[in-house]
Amino acid sequence: MNNSSKNNYSGKNNKQYKKNSNFYSKSTSSSNKNNRFSNNSLKNKIENKFNEGDKNNGNFSPIKRRKPINKSNVEVPNKASDNYQNFSNKRNFDDWIWGKHSVFEALNSERAINRIWCTSEIFSSEKFYILLKNFKSKGVLIEEVSWNRLSQLTFGASHQGVALQLACSKTISLEKLIDFSKRNSANPIILALDGITDPHNVGAIIRSAEAFNCKGIIIPQRRSAGLTGTVAKVAAGALEHLQVSRVVNLNRALEELKKNGFLVIGLSGDGQLSISKFNENSPLVVVVGAEDKGISLLTQKKCDFLLRIPLKGKTSSLNASVAAAISLFHLTCK
């Protein structure tokens, strides 16, 4: 072996050998000295080279031998077809529709839509642009994403630049919800959700709201779980008997409710007034915030009252759905 070959295994070049244990399997040199490495397996190649290193360099420090990698043992996870075949194990796509023709028909039907994902190219189509603009005004969340992101969401399906998720229930406009609630009760109660993204919490709140005869629920377009299959399942049928309005901006919706005679109540652990001492007789909007953040500061400013649920134990807060149920019990039993 020549000196340059020895240097490949001594001193600072040991690190180079660690990084590429199959270096010699790629060599195409036809010299007789290099032909000694053309053994039947990668294991023999590495062992022979270690032996030569020990023989030619007395202070050669042994390197931990890596287990040879066989091509038959290597999995290639980046195949779109494999991802698409296994997508059902990662996400339930029963309420998803993708592809231009399928999505266009769904948008033109009477089916309720929860969310739409599309690439920027879709907006260049006039028929899609008009439909998407109309659905956005109704509170449907429309998210513009890249082609690759949409492929990730659909696990490699042929989406053609657009996909949507169906809702389990139709929504109505805020104006219709106000009219409906006032027609059916002298002092109706409406729940408004602020930043509750857990579908289990949203489903449980809907169940409690229907049980205590609330007239409707307001869900913001963003920062909130939509009316997905999980929400419908947790609601246990209550979603079929409760009006839901999905609004673009929650704070503007609260202002509109105030103009129509509603008092806005926010549930907060920092509220100055206990909910058991609240005795106002008026149409009410009860705002429930997320467990970790509560009601946003801007939404708190829109509230006429901030009420707290008095706790006697060491637990400092309640689950959002539990807090909603307790507050509705107090407000409907006075």
Image: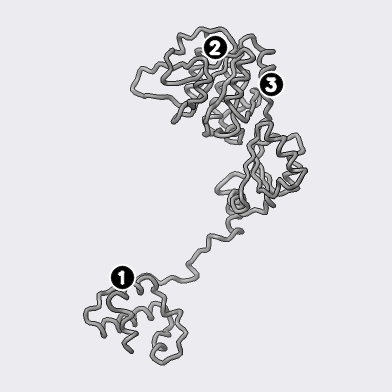
In the depicted structure, whether residue 108 falls above or below residue 235: below
Q: Position of residue 307 (x, y in %)?
A: 46, 16
The residue at the point 64 percent across, 26 percent down is 245
Label 2: which secondary element: helix
Count of labels shown? Answer: 3
Label 1: which secondary element: loop
What amino acid type should be assigned to the residue bearing mark 1?
Lys
Q: Is residue 326 visible?
A: yes
Give whichever of discs 3 and 2 has the lower sequence position.
3
Q: CA distance from mark 3 to mark 2?
A: 24 Å
What amino acid type should be assigned to the residue bearing mark 2?
Thr
Is disc 1 surrounded by few (<14), some (14 to 19) or many (20+) residues within 10 Å?
few
**Image-based side of 152 in relation to 269, left or right:** right
Give whichever of discs 1 and 2 has the lower sequence position.
1
Identify residue for label 1: 64
Give whichever of discs 1 and 3 has the lower sequence position.
1
Nearest to the eye among marks 1 and 3: give it.
3
- Check contact, mark 1 vs mark 2: CB within 8 A: no
Identify residue for label 2: 332
**Image-based side of 277 in relation to 57, left or right:** right
Nearest to the eye among marks 3 and 2: give it.
3
Residue 165 quadrant:
top right
Kindly identify which numbered label has been placed on residue 175. Answer: 3
Residue in front for this viewpoint, 215 or 224? 224
- Check contact, mark 3 vs mark 2: CB within 8 A: no
